[in-house]
């Protein structure tokens, strides 16, 4: 695409060598992926400052650079060791590359990406899902159900990405803007009609999804998380609200009406709002303050029987998922099917066949095992409460053990809250490491234990080594016990630091470790408690 065509009408000011006939072959905000003919978006980031890599990008073949407006005006009177002064001096030394000034380089990057890839989001029925918990499961249900109906659908999420060609593991919940538009363009090329996309608060705050044309947006819930980034719950909520502000008049906003934050999410939306509620037990009527509801008729370890009521009428659905939180996930996915114009009798049957995504209340024990073991991604107080309540509802007299930790370099305030929830709802608690990153595992564990006081401490064990914690929990379990291993879910790596403080990552998958522990238990290694 020619530079003039790419930037026409956008809030970008050429300040050097911006010839309209310059051919742009690629867009990137990572200097390591620059190819000859690239446009490099040098946006400031939270971990790396793109301004520091302008020279590297040009040396690799970038023919144009987008910079923040104040970047181009930075004075070299800044401290000589400052990255900003270095970036400013780079700008004065650049030759042979067009420089484009933007008031907001991140927003400019998103707009450029959509235009470069021929506005792929406008050619798809794009569903965005945001919220603290439930994004992955809701996106997974939508993706699997629509594809089962031969309504070809792509997926961008925490667990995996389906670009219309293949399924691949995801590296983050919501990729950079250039990758999003590239992936959506691939979906369009491969004949996809729709896409389900998890939209994180980080991505919304950093404008990664700002240029996308969403048809439907889903709000799952808002509970404490990511305050190391957003600082306050108000800022966290404001970031998520941006998704609903983006919806057009013909769009649909699907909200969890049982979360007190829902009115704030949609107070400025132009879209039609559909309020959803989940009733926990048979006998509860369709809530009068909702437009759609899920009523749990019965539930066992094998799944739930539901009655889904909404604009389509009332339909029975049996699902292998368990828990009231999953009833809400299913309901919101069903509303999305309706919003996309699909026939209710068709999607209700397809919906019933969808199991959980990887690492979301995923059963890992074999049929012959005398205990049940689940792996779940729950890493917030609310998520822990949801999975423990889901298991308590179907456990009967069977005891429940939870194995969990908390991630390092993240919101520390949620750690004692997680400990309190675990001690209140589980019969036995095993506190261990999650991804400690640069923090001391024992210091993280100590903060979790601050939330566990009084007699519950008698039911708590501590094993900083996660593998040992999982093996101990499974080896010591009584016959019939239910174990939930929480925090990492689908993740396959554990991140920490070495003796020199350098980050290291090792292969670690809760499912694999749990299966090894179950095999050891079947082989008689580790006696069961009776």
Image (cartoon, rainbow, N blue to C red):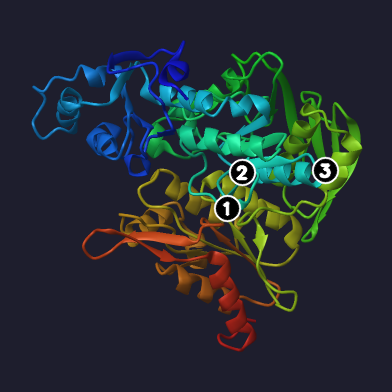
Mark 1 Cα within 10 Å, few/some/many (few <14, many 20+)? few
Taking the spot 80% from the left edge, 47% from the top edge, the residue there is 148
| C-beta proximity under 8 Å, tags 2 and 1 | yes
* In-image side of 391 versus 435 (left or right): right
| Disc with the residue nearer the chain's start (3 vs 1) | 3
| C-beta proximity under 8 Å, tags 2 and 3 | no
- Furthest toward the front, the residue is 21
Taking the spot 72% from the left edge, 39% from the top edge, the residue there is 328
Q: Give how far apart the Cα atoms at labels 3 and 1 are.
A: 22 Å
Whole-percent x, y for residue 111 in the image: 48, 22
Given residues 64 and 163, the one toward you in this image is 64
Given residues 507 and 448, the one toward you in this image is 507
| Disc with the residue nearer the chain's start (2 vs 1) | 2
Whole-percent x, y for residue 82 in the image: 14, 32
- To which quarter of the image does residue 507 belong? bottom left
- To which quarter of the image does residue 394 belong? bottom right
| C-beta proximity under 8 Å, tags 3 and 1 | no
User: Residue tagged by mark 2?
Assistant: 163
Q: Secondary structure at mark 1?
A: strand
Q: Give how far apart the Cα atoms at labels 2 and 3 are.
A: 18 Å
Q: Give how far apart the Cα atoms at labels 2 and 1 are.
A: 9 Å
User: Residue tagged by mark 1?
Assistant: 168
Query: Is residue 307 at least partly visible in the picture?
Result: no
Whole-percent x, y for residue 458 in the image: 49, 67
Q: Is residue 19 above or below residue 132?
A: above
- To which quarter of the image does residue 269 belong? top right
The numbered mark at residue 149 is: 3
Query: Is residue 399 at least partly visible in the picture?
Result: yes
| Disc with the residue nearer the chain's start (2 vs 3) | 3
Quadrant in the picture for the C terminus: bottom right
């Amino acid at each position: 695409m020619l530079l003039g065509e790419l930037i026409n009408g956008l809030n970008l000011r050429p300040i050097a060598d911006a010839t309209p006939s310059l051919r742009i072959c690629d867009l990137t905000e990572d200097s390591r992926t620059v190819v000859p003919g690239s446009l490099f978006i040098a946006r400031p980031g939270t971990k790396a400052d793109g301004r520091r890599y302008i020279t590297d990008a040009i040396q690799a073949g970038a023919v144009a650079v987008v910079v923040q407006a104040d970047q181009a005006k930075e004075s070299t009177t800044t401290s000589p060791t400052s990255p900003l002064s270095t970036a400013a001096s780079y700008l004065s030394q650049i030759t042979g590359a067009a420089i484009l000034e933007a008031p907001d380089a991140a927003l400019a990057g998103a707009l450029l990406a959509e235009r470069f890839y021929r506005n792929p989001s406008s050619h798809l029925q794009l569903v965005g899902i945001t919220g603290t918990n439930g994004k992955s499961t809701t996106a997974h249900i939508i993706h699997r159900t629509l594809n089962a109906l031969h309504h070809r659908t792509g997926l961008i999420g925490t667990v995996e990405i389906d670009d219309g060609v293949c399924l691949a593991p995801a590296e983050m919940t919501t990729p950079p803007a250039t990758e999003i538009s590239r992936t959506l363009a691939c979906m369009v090329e491969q004949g996809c009609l729709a896409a389900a996309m998890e939209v994180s608060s980080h991505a919304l705050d950093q404008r990664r999804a700002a240029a996308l044309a969403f048809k439907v947006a889903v709000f799952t819930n808002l509970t404490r998380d990511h305050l190391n980034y957003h600082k306050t719950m108000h800022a966290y909520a404001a970031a998520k609200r941006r998704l609903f502000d983006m919806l057009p008049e013909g769009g649909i906003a699907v909200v969890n009406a049982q979360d007190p934050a829902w009115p704030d999410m949609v107070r400025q939306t132009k879209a039609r709002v559909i309020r959803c509620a989940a009733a926990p037990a048979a006998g509860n009527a369709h809530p009068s303050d909702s437009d759609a509801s899920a009523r749990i008729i019965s539930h066992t370890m094998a799944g739930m029987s539901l009655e889904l009521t909404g604009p389509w009428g009332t339909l029975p659905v049996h699902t292998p998922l368990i828990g009231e939180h999953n009833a809400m996930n299913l309901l919101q996915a069903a509303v999305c099917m309706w919003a996309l114009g699909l026939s209710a009798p068709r999607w209700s049957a397809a919906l019933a066949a969808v199991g959980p995504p990887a690492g979301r209340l995923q059963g890992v024990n074999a049929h012959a095992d005398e205990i049940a073991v689940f792996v779940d991604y729950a890493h917030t107080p609310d998520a822990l409460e949801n999975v423990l309540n889901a298991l308590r509802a179907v456990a009967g007299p069977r005891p429940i053990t939870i194995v969990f930790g908390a991630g390092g370099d993240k919101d520390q305030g949620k750690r004692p809250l997680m400990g309190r929830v675990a001690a209140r709802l589980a019969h036995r608690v095993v506190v261990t490491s999650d991804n400690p990153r640069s923090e001391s595992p024992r210091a993280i564990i100590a903060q979790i234990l601050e939330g566990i006081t009084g007699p519950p401490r008698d039911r708590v064990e501590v094993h900083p080594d996660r593998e040992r914690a999982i093996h101990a929990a499974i080896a010591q379990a009584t016959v019939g016990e239910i174990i939930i291993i929480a925090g990492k879910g689908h993740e396959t790596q554990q991140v920490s630091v070495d003796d020199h403080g350098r980050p290291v990552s090792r292969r670690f998958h809760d499912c694999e470790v749990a299966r090894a522990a179950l095999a050891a238990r079947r082989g008689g290694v580790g006696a069961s408690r009776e």
